[in-house]
Amino acid sequence: MTEQRLKKHVKGRKGEKFRQKIKGLQPREIVGVAIDVSKSFHRVMIFNFEGEVSREPFEVDVFEKGYREFIGEADRVVKEFEPKKTFWVMEPTGAYYENVSRHLKGDGEEVMFANPAQVASNRDQMMLHGLKSDDIDLGAMADLLIRGECYSYNLEEGVYLELKEKTWWREKKLKIQTRLKNQIRARLDKIFPGLTSEYGGNKPLFSDLWEQSSARGLMKVGLTPRQILDLPTMSLKKRFKDAGYPITTDCAKKIKGYMGKMLLPKDKVLNPEIELLRRDVKLLETLEAEIAEVEDEMVKGVKETPWSHLLGKIKGIGDIMVASFAGAVGDITGFKCGSQIFRKSGLDSKRKQSGEYEAKGLPIRRMGSKFLRCILYKMADSVIKHNPYFGLYYEYLVEKRNKLSKKAQIAVSNKLVRVMFAMVRARAEFNPPTAKIEYLEVLFSRTKHERKERREERKRRREKAHLDSSISLASRHRVPGKAVSLHS
């Protein structure tokens, strides 16, 4: 089937593909089975494509007995009406749909998915805003299936399934880790006032609170600022060594000196905080160890894919990023172009066009995978910092095209995805056009300080233009005898 043929449908490629599935069939010859899956039971409705309900909604349990029950009911409908095609449709929400859909596909059934956002939108279209029930959702899924709005989806298998689950697990645990670090930081500020303060040119005691061994030791020794001051330097060194974080004599003196300038809280107030800090740090270390172990497994797993070695050669993209990308996307060879992957992330911009008018500067759609969106943003941030090709492209967008930093980073992620897809398709290593890099290097040969000054100058010009526009607008609506106020 040619690309031109796939586009000859009012609903585009998806509509044409579904039309091919039911080509030559009458609506009464097609049966649909809508399943509203949940934790404890499933709700099922059987219908034909004329919209007639063949079996009223009924409930089955989540065990094998329930599965066999609705399979048997569907078989009875098939024998009764003798349809030529049967579709099964469900919402891919939560963890409940996957097991049922895998069993159905294993039994040779054609499974379609209804986007949850479309199901909710369908309720609004039917004037059911504010109303939701399992039966209403079954009707919405049936309507979407009949209209050809559902899609087929190949569930991941093998290494891609493993990477997907571990990527999701890691991303969720990283969020927990961030929250835990914020709680520890707040507790440290209470125990050691001013520990991380940079006000007035003050230099914090630790440059990195999480990577420095001495900082982790301070969290684990279980001492208040007064107790640290009262201890001799050598005794303080011993306490750190006993905690598993040895420090030098100079470091011990530095810690005591920093404690000496603090506004010291009373020890009675800090005793419960010290105990809770110890527990928080222990929990953090356990979480870090588990995350590191899963990351090692992800790196080993992604090496089984036929294309990971290519992406790993892009400077700025490490093995963990490649593994996370594979977990969020699946097999990259299943896509037709890099833009499809980018759209799946929901980072593509909204569009508003009417006649000759087309809006610019619209926000991103956020209609795809939030995990892929997060991973692409992190990958773009990394290549901007460590890869000259993408770093200079980012500078070009910010400096010459006046893009905001976040929009420029999203544009870099789009370019990165298309580059990665092209590498996999051509089985080629990363080899950017040298001429473009040399041009951009000449274009941005000034220092970072000079670039920062230019950005600030552009910001001042934009603010001045906005102010002039406000004054002009206010003068046009000025009431005689009254002063003009820009804040009125």
Image (cartoon, helix red, strand yellow):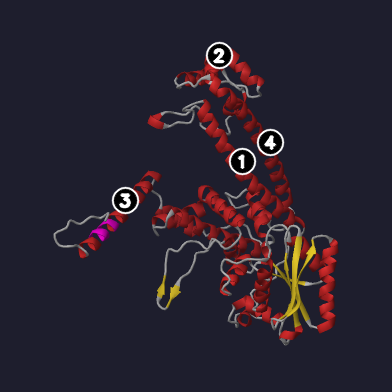
273, 400: nearer the viewer: 273
**Quick one: label 2, few (<14), some, or many (20+) residues within 10 Å?**
some
Q: Label 2, label 3: how many angstroms apart (C-alpha)?
A: 51 Å
Q: Is residue 221 magenta?
A: no
Tell whether label 1 touches label 3 (CB within 8 Å): no
Q: Amino acid at mark 2?
A: Thr
Give the residue pinned by disc 4: 286
- Hey, which residue is sitting farthest left in the picture? 481
Image location of residue 487, percent across then percent down? 27, 54
What separation in Å lies between label 1 and label 2 (alpha carbons)? 33 Å
Residue range in magenta is 466-471
Amino acid carrying mark 4 in the image: Thr
Asked whether the beta carbons under mark 1 and mark 4 sit within 8 Å of each other, the answer is no
**Picture coordinates of residue 332, whole percent (x, y):** 66, 62
Q: Residue at x 44, y 53 (%)?
A: 405
Work out whether 303 lies above or below 203: below
Q: Which residue lies under the disc numbered 3?
A: 457
**Residue for badge 1:** 177
Question: In front: 127, or 462?
Answer: 127
> Of helix, strand and loop, which one carries label 1?
helix
Crowd class of label 1 (few under 14; some 14 to 19; many from 20; radius 10 Å): some
Asked if one can make out residue 302 in the rendered structure from this viewpoint, the answer is no
Are the residues flagged by discs 4 and 3 in contact, CB closer than 8 Å?
Answer: no
Across and down, in percent, residue 61 comes to 80, 62
Determine the image quadrant of residue 118. Answer: bottom right
Q: Is residue 12 visible?
A: yes
First reached walking from the N terminus: tag 4 or tag 2: 2
